[in-house]
Every structure is written in C-alpha cells, then in structure tokens.
Image (spheres, helix red, strand yellow):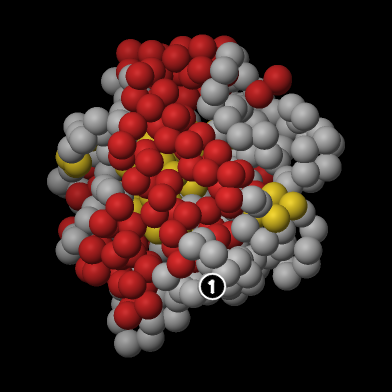
Amino acid sequence: MKTGSPLFQPFQCKSLNLKNRIVMAPMTRHFSPGFIPGDDVVAYYRRRAENNVGLIITEGTTINQCASNGYEGVPAFHGEALLGWQKVVDAVHSAGGKIMPQLWHVGTVRRPGVGPDGDVPGMGPSGISSAGKRKAHTMSEQEIQDCIDAFAQAAADAEALGFDGIELHGAHGYLIDQFFWKVTNERSDRWGGSFEKRSQFAVDVVKAVREKVSEQFPVIFRFSQWKQQDYDARLVTSAEQLDQFLKVLVDAGVDVFHASTRRFWEPEFTGSDLNLAGWTKKLTGLPTISVGSVGLNSDFIDAVFKREGPEVVGKRSITDLEERLESQEFDLVGVGRALLQDPAWAEKVGSGRFDEIEDFDRNSMDTLY
C-alpha cells in the first residue's frame, strides 16, 4: 500500500471526526439473549475500535414497535437493552473509536413465533413479501405512524447515550425498503401509488429523526438496489431516477448515504465506471460510503494493496479502491466480513502486515470474536 493512502486519511461530517475512512459495516449477529447486548458484545465492538477501525456501525438494532424484530438473539434499541448499549458506547470511546447504531425494522420478513411476542405477525406496507406473495399484515396508518415515532425515539436515545450518529436501515428488502419497492408496496394513500409516494415513509422517518436530534448529529441512510431475497432487483434503472429518489431524502435531512452493493468495483449504470456510491455522491454532493466484497481474503488484499504485480480484482485494476477514494468518487469504505473474521484487519492493512490477515471463514459467523 502506498504511503499516504487515502484509506487512512481523516474524515469529518458535522460532529463526526474520523481518523480514517474504514467503516465497519453492519452485520447481523445473534448473540444478545433476551435482545440485550451483554459483555461479549461490548468486547466484540471494543476489539475493532482498538484495532484502528475509523467508524463502527453496529449490527441492526430493532426499534420499539411490536413487529420490528425478525430474528432471535438480535439486540433491541429500547428498554433494558439501552443499558447494554451504554456499555458498548463507553468501551468503544475509551478505545478511541467512533460508533453508531443501525436502526432497523424487518417488516414482512418477521416470521411467526419470533420474540419477544411470538403472536405478533410480520407487517409491511401491503403485507406482501419480496416474492410478491401476501404473507403478512398490511399496516394501518396508525401503525405506520407508530414506526415513524419509534425510529425517531431510537435516534434520540442514541444521541443521549453518546453515540456518534445513527444509521437508518433502508436497504435489502426490510421495512423502509418495502415501502420503496413497487413489488411490496401497493398502497394508494400518501405512502404509495407512485414512485414519489413510495418514498414518503422514508422521508417521514428522516424528518422525524431530525426533529428529535441536534443539528450536528449525523444521520446516515443505507439503501440498496438488491434485496436479500432478489439480487437482481432494481429500485431505479437510470441516473435520472436515482436523482429523483435521492433528492427527497437529502431535503428531509440525510447527511451521509451508505450505498450497499455486492461488489464495490461494479459500475451502476452503463456508460460510466461510477459505482452506486459514486453516482450518489455525484448527484447529491453528500458524503457516501461504498461497500461490497472489500477484503474477503488474502488474495484480494494482495491484489488491492500490495506494491507489485499486474493482478486484478474481478475485472478491476489493483489500485482501484485507492484511486476511487483519491478521486473522491466516494468518501468512506465499508468493510464487513473481513472485520467479522479478523478484528485487527484495519490495523494490519494500515501497517502493511498483509501476510497476517486472516481469510474469511464462514465458521466465524458462529462466534462473537
């Protein structure tokens, strides 16, 4: 890796000051019994902060609405769970790190029997799964408002606990994304019926959050084209549509966009090498996080960061990641499974210890190290 790599340059947005551009991407874990993060969760995040991760975005945390949770062992962000999150914040800050919770509602993904109240059904804008099947409860206007209020309260709680900002999970086929997508949103009221109206729920959530937190408290919005159930799904098919999609979220108060893709080097639209994060920054002027298959194994690290050789990553140049950062195509780099496997990934990359980086092993999903 070259001296003065843009990956290890500082970054600032409102009250958020980062020592480098590496972001630990949110990754769902199942290690919070009773939906409360314990000491092992505290240690898990502290280890990443101790090892030079610039910003940690937590696993998805569920808001205080009865159907928000879809998985056992996933931490809540309300009630008793806030005591556990206070310990996480304190530990990360004491290690010199920055951290934000990802606020989440799973929508129709929720399955019968999942706690804390197994009798509560999954729900969504039209009760339709991403496969186009009716499998859940259609939300009433009051239930929609309850969710908006719950997102806003969670953001206020995050600021009160000392978090460095929040991320709203608007991607991958969960509730906010279900409102965006015409397959799952057949409403004809203010929250559906057109491309513009399908964005209204997200706009209302962002506005409600902004009203509850201070002006300098950063709000990140994560979105994606693909869904966990459909990798080929597309919300928009052109830069013009993407501009229309993003503009209302900018106006509502988003500070940073987290553009989730599966491979960071893939162009989003024909005729341009820009990825989704690059297009998002070009259209909005706001900072963006790019993510997708960064550092999954040592061969990838060698190809991206080492000095010699004509290696490529997929069909991309060995210097692609750094060149994109240096050209300001995007501002921050989300790293997921590589940091799940190896908490010292950022420290090893920064100090050139590439031979020590651990390859990703799916068995690491079963531990909280």
From the viewer's side, name the closer residue of 269 and 170.
Answer: 170
x, y percentage for residue 359?
Answer: 55, 45
From the viewer's side, name the closer residue of 104 and 87.
Answer: 104
Q: Is residue 327 left or right of residue 279?
A: left
Quadrant of residue 187 within the rendered picture = bottom right
Instruction: Name the residue located 29 percent from the left edge and 65 percent from the top edge.
Output: 247
Q: Does 298 appear above or below 352?
A: below
Q: Does 52 appear above or below 194?
A: above
Q: Which element carries disc 1, helix, strand or loop?
A: loop
x, y percentage for residue 104?
Answer: 54, 41
Instruction: Report whether residue 4 is seen.
Output: yes
Instruction: Name the residue located 63 percent from the left edge and 69 percent from the top edge.
Output: 186
Total marks in image: 1
Q: Amino acid at mark 1?
A: Gly
Q: Is residue 249 left or right of residue 262?
A: left
Q: Looking at this rendering, what residue extends furthest in the bottom direction?
A: 271
Instruction: Name the residue located 57 percent from the left edge and 69 percent from the top edge.
Output: 188
The C terminus, quarter of image: top right
From the viewer's side, name the closer residue of 274 and 103.
Answer: 103
Residue beneath label 1, please? 193
From the viewer's side, name the closer residue of 135 and 83.
Answer: 135
Q: Is residue 141 left or right of residue 50?
A: right
Q: Does 257 appear above or below 63?
A: below
Instruction: Report whether residue 1 is seen.
Output: no
Q: Does 317 appear above or below 163?
A: below
Q: Is residue 56 left or right of residue 217?
A: right
Callout 1 environment at 10 Å: few (<14), some (14 to 19), or many (20+)?
some
x, y percentage for residue 40?
Answer: 59, 17
x, y percentage for residue 14?
Answer: 18, 38
Instruction: Name the residue located 27 percent from the left edge and 44 percent from the top edge.
Output: 21
Quadrant of residue 214 within the rendered picture = top left
